[in-house]
Image: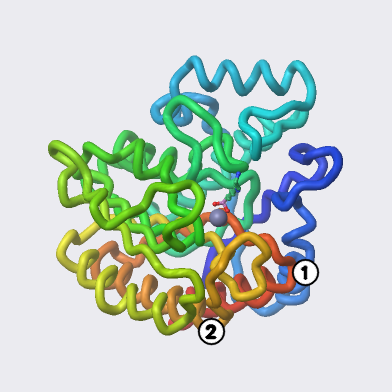
Amino acid sequence: MVGLHIETNENSHFARGGHPESAGRLTPVKNWLREQSNSGKFLPIEINQFGLDPVNRVHSKRYVDQLNHACRNGAGHLDPDTYVSEQSFESAQRVVDSVLSAVDAAMTGELRSSFLLVRPPGHHAEHDRAMGFCLFNNVAVAAQHLIDRHKVSKVAIVDFDVHHGNGTQHIFYDRPDVYFISTHQYPFYPGTGSVHETGSGAGKGFNLNIPLAAGAGDLQLVAAFEQQILPALGRYQPEFILVSAGFDAHRLDPLGGLNVTGSGFKAVAELLTKVAAETANGRIVSILEGGYDPQGNLDSISNYLLGLDHT
Ligand code: OKP
Ligand code: ZN
């Protein structure tokens, strides 16, 4: 049984004149999920409100205020790629609330594995700035909440979006309590993500980048999980696994240049579920990041969800 929550903010976070990061990219997968509603495979997550405190643990007050004001002033851009509309701040807060609710449900044991079909995404957002379609760094807020509220001492974040999660890496770069592991196309946007970025100070050795060359597909992605990510997680023994689940490595994706298919994402979900059972008491929360082809997302996400539920 997998926890599921949909928070796609179609009427509250949008760009005028079109943008690849729009709610429309999720229409086919939402229709598929509606058809699955009597399957018994997915359970709704009860959502609680957490306020801004958890966000303020990761982002600077200056940035949170800037984002709030940009929205209050109406639509605009925070960087060339990143728009806000009037209700984007509340949208981003709803995403954080749903992610933290899933984390809490995993900690109580109610729902050990959940998937959050949410937007806006988060993994490019840094401590002090929005970037690459991302407002709040959802996965980072979740990791910090586990440490602050649940006294977890080791959290792993696995990020398989086609783009490197520079924001998440940046936020935890000098810390050993959050192990950031990323597969991504490289060289590619945003430019970071080389194998030489391994962490600094007390965080040295707790940042693992696995760059993939343009054109890589299921074989290379699954090999990265089997040969590098699972062994690394086995050594680290995280108490919780968070996943930045972006699906723009799919072969149909208009932004990415990789060739992953639904079966690759299903294998990834199965491997992550297995390692979560072995290390983290089965606790794993997957949060949507990118993925820009509607049919690609249907193939990717439906297969990923079936992989999460294979037990
Ligand atoms: C967000 B996520 C050059 C192109 C920038 C931005 C891509 C953001 C992806 N200015 N493209 O990781 O899917
Ligand atoms: Zn991406």
Q: Is residue 186 left or right of residue 206?
A: right
Coordinates of residue 219 in the picture (x, y in percent)? 42, 84
Colour scheme of the picture: rainbow
Identify the residue under disc 2: 263
Task: Assign the C terminus to one quadrant of the image.
Answer: bottom left
Q: Marks 1 and 2: in contact by CB < 8 Å? A: no
| Badge 2 amino acid | Ser
Rate crowding at label 1 as few (under 14), some (14 to 19) or many (20 or more) other CA atoms within 10 Å.
some
Q: Residue at x 55, y 37 (%)?
A: 131
Coordinates of residue 194 in the picture (x, y in percent)? 32, 54
Judge whether 213 appears above or below 52 on screen. below
Q: Tell me the SS state at disc 1.
A: helix
Name the quadrant where ligand 2 sits. Answer: bottom right
Mark 2 or mark 1: which comes first in sequence?
1
Q: Is residue 15 left or right of residue 175?
A: right
Coordinates of residue 134 in the picture (x, y in percent)? 58, 40
Judge whether 266 appears above or below 143 on screen. below
| Badge 1 amino acid | Pro
Q: Residue at x 37, y 77 (%)?
A: 271
Rate crowding at label 2 as few (under 14), some (14 to 19) or many (20 or more) other CA atoms within 10 Å.
some
Q: Nearer the viewer, residue 249 or 86?
A: 249
Q: Is residue 247 left or right of residue 213?
A: right
Identify the residue under disc 1: 28
Q: Nearer the viewer, residue 219 or 34?
A: 219
**Residue furthest out toward the right:** 17
Q: Tell me the SS state at disc 2.
A: helix
Q: Tell me how far mark 2 sits from mark 1, CA to CA.
A: 18 Å
Q: Nearer the viewer, residue 195 or 12?
A: 195
